[in-house]
């Protein structure tokens, strides 16, 4: 099992390895496998990239992200300009249903709301706007709603987990309550935890996934 010092060094190396990140802008502390990222970057995309890089490191149990986004005056955009760019980005993204997502922009933060059928549509909406110039953060409050009722949800999820080469399904307990799924058990990486969550969301009728999987090494 890695020590906190070893995890910190690996996170720093991973940040330095990523071409989109300037590792000198980001501070890293680790306590009991929980990584805290601090610092200031000049784009929201760099903030997301740093968080993703930290989560990919073996031994990381969780990531607390406290990175601030500050644009220079030459790149600063008004909320009106960001809102228009965000609306265009959603319109051009074929994965986002037309007229299903609402946008609000306040001090550079984009707030997404509305209702879609699938998790990938919700994720696509966030991905479409988070790299826009001037964006300081994205709050994704889009909800899921399908006309069908959940049918054999637990069996479908278990089979999906068993098909995946990246997941050890025998260590995962799937609990279904109506449209809500709770995941419990142990996985070996943050990536595996996210893969299990995605697999659960693909089951028809699932609106919410409570991912309580523990990352162990």
Image (cartoon, rainbow, N blue to C red):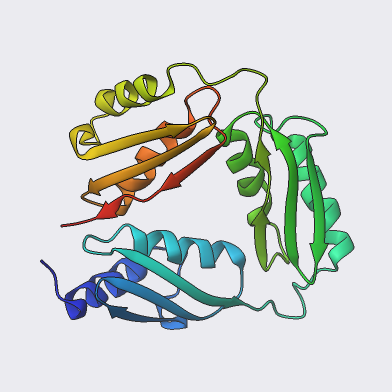
Residue 109 falls left or right of residue 156: right
Q: Position of residue 201 (x, y in %)?
A: 48, 33
Q: Position of residue 85 (x, y in %)?
A: 80, 52
Residue at the (32%, 48%) spot, across then down: 191
| Nearer to the camera, 150 or 35 | 150
| Nearer to the camera, 199 or 156 | 156
Residue 4 sits above or below residue 192 on the image: below
Residue 76 sits above or below residue 128 on the image: below
Q: Position of residue 145 (x, y in %)?
A: 66, 30
| Nearer to the camera, 72 or 203 | 203
Find residue 50 and report its image quarter.
Answer: bottom left
Q: Quadrant of the N terminus?
A: bottom left
Residue 54 sits above or below residue 166 on the image: below
Q: Position of residue 216 (x, y in %)?
A: 19, 56
Q: Quadrant of the C terminus?
A: bottom left
Residue at the (85%, 68%) spot, across then down: 78
Residue at the (40%, 32%) spot, across then down: 199
Find residue 105 and report its image quarter.
Answer: bottom right
Residue furthest to the right:
80
Residue 63 falls left or right of residue 172: right
Residue 70 sits above or below residue 126 on the image: below
Residue at the (21%, 77%) spot, across then down: 4
Find residue 182 and report its image quarter.
Answer: top left
- Exactly how many numbered labels are in the figure? 0
| Nearer to the camera, 202 or 179 | 179
């Amino acid at each position: 099992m890695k020590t906190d010092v070893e995890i910190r060094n690996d996170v720093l190396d991973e940040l330095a390895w990523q071409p989109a990140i300037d590792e000198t802008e980001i501070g890293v502390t680790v306590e009991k496998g929980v990584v805290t990222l601090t610092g200031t970057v000049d784009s929201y995309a760099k903030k997301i990239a740093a968080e993703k890089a930290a989560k990919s490191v073996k031994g990381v149990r969780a990531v607390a992200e406290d990175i601030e986004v500050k644009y220079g005056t030459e790149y600063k955009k008004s909320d009106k300009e960001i809102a228009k760019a965000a609306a265009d980005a959603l319109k051009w993204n074929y994965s986002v249903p037309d007229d299903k997502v609402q946008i609000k922009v306040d001090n550079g933060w984009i707030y997404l709301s509305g209702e879609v059928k699938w998790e990938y549509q919700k994720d696509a909406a966030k991905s479409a706007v988070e790299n826009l110039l001037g964006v300081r953060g994205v709050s994704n409050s889009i909800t899921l709603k399908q006309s069908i009722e959940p049918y054999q949800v637990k069996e479908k999820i278990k089979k999906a987990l068993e098909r995946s080469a990246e997941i050890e399904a025998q260590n995962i307990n799937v609990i279904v309550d109506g449209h809500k799924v709770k995941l419990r058990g142990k996985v070996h990486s943050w990536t595996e935890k996210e893969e299990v969550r995605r697999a659960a969301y693909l089951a028809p009728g699932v609106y919410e996934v409570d991912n309580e999987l523990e990352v162990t090494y």
